Amino acid sequence: MPSRAKGAAANGAEATSSSSLKITVNGLPIDRPCPPERILLDLLREDLDLTGTKRGCDLGTCGCCTVLVDGRPTLSCLTLARLVDRRSITTIEGVTPVHGLSTLQRAFVEHGATQCGFCTPGFLVTATALLEERPHPTRSEIIDAISGNLCRCTGYTKIIEAIEAAAREGR
Ligand code: FES
Ligand code: FES
């Protein structure tokens, strides 16, 4: 399931010796120098101004920083930017339509699945990957997929119901 792939980019790829980073972010090619110690979350938020991806724990436990690396949910706070060289990154900005909201985002609003909203980008990115892989997940598959995302506000039921509703509508 997508949640179990988190951190895969940090663990499974080989570092390159080049300081030049070539990645695709939300469909746009990026080619820029990158210090070897740069964390993907910092690259996205500070260098590319993509602040939709949130920094929660910075320890790999909350899921707020989740982005897609080649379509797989990945914790950007634990991932060195150089390890995603030549990969495709999708952030919350990339899963949001230019005009309006996606079906999944609308379902979150309609089901009250977002309160303070701080965790919401991570949930939406994770759920987007889930529905891509499994358009009609069971409730237990949804619970498993979002198990790496923490929310202090909603109690999770509304989030699960929103994902189920989006699945019914076809995301
Ligand atoms: S900020 Fe990355 S898991 Fe919490
Ligand atoms: S909506 Fe507040 S932490 Fe999830």
Image: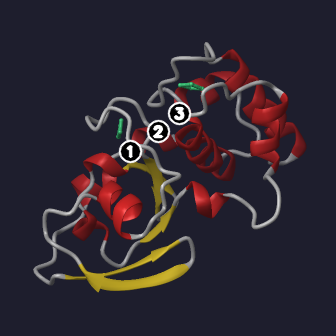
Q: Residue at x 61, y 63 (%)?
A: 94
Q: Under 8 Å from ligand 2: the CB of mark 3?
A: yes
Q: Give residue 49's position: percent from left, percent from top.
A: 45, 65
Left or right: residue 150 compared with residue 163? left
Q: Position of residue 19 (x, y in %)?
A: 16, 82
Kind of residue sitting beneath label 3: Cys
From the viewer's perspective, is residue 35 above or below residue 73? below
Residue in front for this viewpoint, 22 or 9:
22
Q: Are circles 3 and 1 on residues that touch, CB within 8 Å? A: no
Q: Which residue bears the numbered disc 1?
A: 6
Q: Quadrant of residue 146?
A: top right
* Label annotation for residue 119: 3
**Residue 3: assigned label:** 2
Ligand 1: give its quadrant. top left
N-term-proximal mark, 3 vs 1: 1
Q: Secondary structure at mark 2?
A: helix
What is the residue that sits farthest to the right in this orientation? 169
Residue 97 is left or right of residue 88, and the answer is right
Q: Of all residues shown, which one is farthest toward the left?
A: 17
Q: Nearer the viewer, mark 2 or mark 3?
A: 3
Image coordinates for residue 171, horizontal then vertical, percent = 80, 48
Above or below: residue 149 compared with residue 29: above
Q: Amino acid at mark 2?
A: Ser
Residue 134 vs residue 47: left or right? right
Instruction: Identify the residue at horizontal 66%, vertical 25% (top origin).
Output: 115
Q: Position of residue 22 (x, y in %)?
A: 34, 83
> Which label lies toward us, 3 or 1?
3
